[in-house]
Image: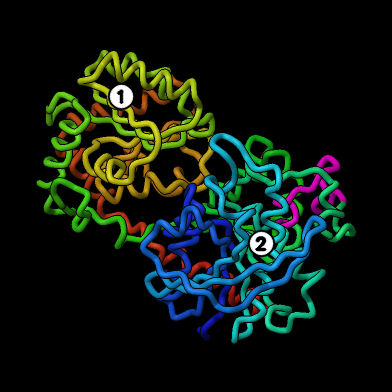
């Protein structure tokens, strides 16, 4: 296997900027590829409001890319950063990227997002073309970089270092497609001969997700089950027919974790560390979580945890429909997240009325999240759809047994009790009743210590590393290059 030169072009990447799982993937997968001795560069916008607060050294390259967009000629300085040996190129344009929100204000999206990301796509391609070595693979992610395969094949064939590069487009969440009015075609100089139903036209609008699907050399999504689901009307978000036409270049590769970052044997956010075979520290973590959240300290009380966006996709309504009866049964519930205002209000009210049984933290708190993974008994993910999901991987890594809806990556990564090798519990229907049955089954097993210990140990031992997935991506890259 020869060394590949891979360029990731992405709208966010941990630890520099993060709104969700995309950033985790864009930070961890390049590292895994590096460990396989491939050369990787990550190109992303310079979100100054976020990045300058970090303990990361940013250096000017002295280079700038001149780029036209929406009637304005812009000069975009390029910066470099190195994080744990991984090279980043950051595209500066402060009026577009130095904003409080990465994609929009709280609960919304910026009206000029197409300008922001098409400009970034073009500058990123120019930056890739200036790298000292010829690029073999350009790996794009979600709608923000969906135009790159189109632009590469229509407007950047003169750039020798990238002209022959193969493109991979990863769909992290098909629900977000980047749809904008067609007036942006002329404002951004997009190739109009691709603006048709078999290209990136969508109800007479621009659809960036369609652009990536249409023109990329390969399409991946973040679990094998989700790759099948998006070809159906239930999950296809109106693109199932279009995706079916491109199914020959679609495959699912499940996400992984950076195991060094998520390790209960070394995590200094925890009251006590532990690992499979030496589990005493987990009991201390449960006690510490109960104390920190004001819950009654009782080792035998099941502690249910949920860390999530409070959104319909995540099945928060299924949780809320069950809170009363779970509290009446004596369970404890710890929830961390934000989103839908009504859901936030209801969670606050339940926690206020039952302070020794329920705790709700609005927003995100990484220290608390790690303590919840470690201190919880069951981790709830009642998602209506979940392309891959990372929460269940983190939960299993910490011995917090997942109770999940059998969809997408949840189905692929959590082996359901009572199957051999079970690491968690499934339910099929997106209903409160089905969710409750699964939780009751988990609680019943929790009260059977020997069986519960076996499930928890298998969860702790599950290999959720990026190793296998990174090798699958390398196999895909090699196949694209071999086919010319």
In this rendering, the answer to whether 204 lies above or below 324 is below
Say which of 81 and 3 sits in front: 81
In the depicted view, which residue is nearer to us: 41 or 459?
Answer: 41
The residues bearing labels 1 and 2 have C-alpha atoms spaced at a distance of: 49 Å
Residue at horizontal 19%, vertical 48%?
270
Measured as percent of width and height from the top left, residue 91 is found at: 59, 66
Residue to which mark 1 is pinned: 440
In-front residue for pair 160/217: 160
- Local secondary structure at mark 2: helix
Q: Position of residue 111 (x, y in %)?
A: 70, 42
Q: Which residue is mark 2?
A: 120
Q: Is residue 210 magenta?
A: yes
**Is residue 260 inside the magenta stretch?**
no
The residue located at (13%, 35%) in the rendering is 287
Q: Residue at x 32, y 37 (%)?
A: 379
Of labels 1 and 2, the one closer to you: 2
Residue neighbourhood size for the residue with mark 1, other residues' Cα within 10 Å, grouped as few (<14), some (14–19), many (≥20): few
Residue 47: numbered disc? none
Q: Is there any visible trace of residue 425 in the rendered image? A: no
Q: Which residues are magenta?
A: 196-213
* Residue 249 percent coordinates (x, y): 68, 61
């Amino acid at each position: 296997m020869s060394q590949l030169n891979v360029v990731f072009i992405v709208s966010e990447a941990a630890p520099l900027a993060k709104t969700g799982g995309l950033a985790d993937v864009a930070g961890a997968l390049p590292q895994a590829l590096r460990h396989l001795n491939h050369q990787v560069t990550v190109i992303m916008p310079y979100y100054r409001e976020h990045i300058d607060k970090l303990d990361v050294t940013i250096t000017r390259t002295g280079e700038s890319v001149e780029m036209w967009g929406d009637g304005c000629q812009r000069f975009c300085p390029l910066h470099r950063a190195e994080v744990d040996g991984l090279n980043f190129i950051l595209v500066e344009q402060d009026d577009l990227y130095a904003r409080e929100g990465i994609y929009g204000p709280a609960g919304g999206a910026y009206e000029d997002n197409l300008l922001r990301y098409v400009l970034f796509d073009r500058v990123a391609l120019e930056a890739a073309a200036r790298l000292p070595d010829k690029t073999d693979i350009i790996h794009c992610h979600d709608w923000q970089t969906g135009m790159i395969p189109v632009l590469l094949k229509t407007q950047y064939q003169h750039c020798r270092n990238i002209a022959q590069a193969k493109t991979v487009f990863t769909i992290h969440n098909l629900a977000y497609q980047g749809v904008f009015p067609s007036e942006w075609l002329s404002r951004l100089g997009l190739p109009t001969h691709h603006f048709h139903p078999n290209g990136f036209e969508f109800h007479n609008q621009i659809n960036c997700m369609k652009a990536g699907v249409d023109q990329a050399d390969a399409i991946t999504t973040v679990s094998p089950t989700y790759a099948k689901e998006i070809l159906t009307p239930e999950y296809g978000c109106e693109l199932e027919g279009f995706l079916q036409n491109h199914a020959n270049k679609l495959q699912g590769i499940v996400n992984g974790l950076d195991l060094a970052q998520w390790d209960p044997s070394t995590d200094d956010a925890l009251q006590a560390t532990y690992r499979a075979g030496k589990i005493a520290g987990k009991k201390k973590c449960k006690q510490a979580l109960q104390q920190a959240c004001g819950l009654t300290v009782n080792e035998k009380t099941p502690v249910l945890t949920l860390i999530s966006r409070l959104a319909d996709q995540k099945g928060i309504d299924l949780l809320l429909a069950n809170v009363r009866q779970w509290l009446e049964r004596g369970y404890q519930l710890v929830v961390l997240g934000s989103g839908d205002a009504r859901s936030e209000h209801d969670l606050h009210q339940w926690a206020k009325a039952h302070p020794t049984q329920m705790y709700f933290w609005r927003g995100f708190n990484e220290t608390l999240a790690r303590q919840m993974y470690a201190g919880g008994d069951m981790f709830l993910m009642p998602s209506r759809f979940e392309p891959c999901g990372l929460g269940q991987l983190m939960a299993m890594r910490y011995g917090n047994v997942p109770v999940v809806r059998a969809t997408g990556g949840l189905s692929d990564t959590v082996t359901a009790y009572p199957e051999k090798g079970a690491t968690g519990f499934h339910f099929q229907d997106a209903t409160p009743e089905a969710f409750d049955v699964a939780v009751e089954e988990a609680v019943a097993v929790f009260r059977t210590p020997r069986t519960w210990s076996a499930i928890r140990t298998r969860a702790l031992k599950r290999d959720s590393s990026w190793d296998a997935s990174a090798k699958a991506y390398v196999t895909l890259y090699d196949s694209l290059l071999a086919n010319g």
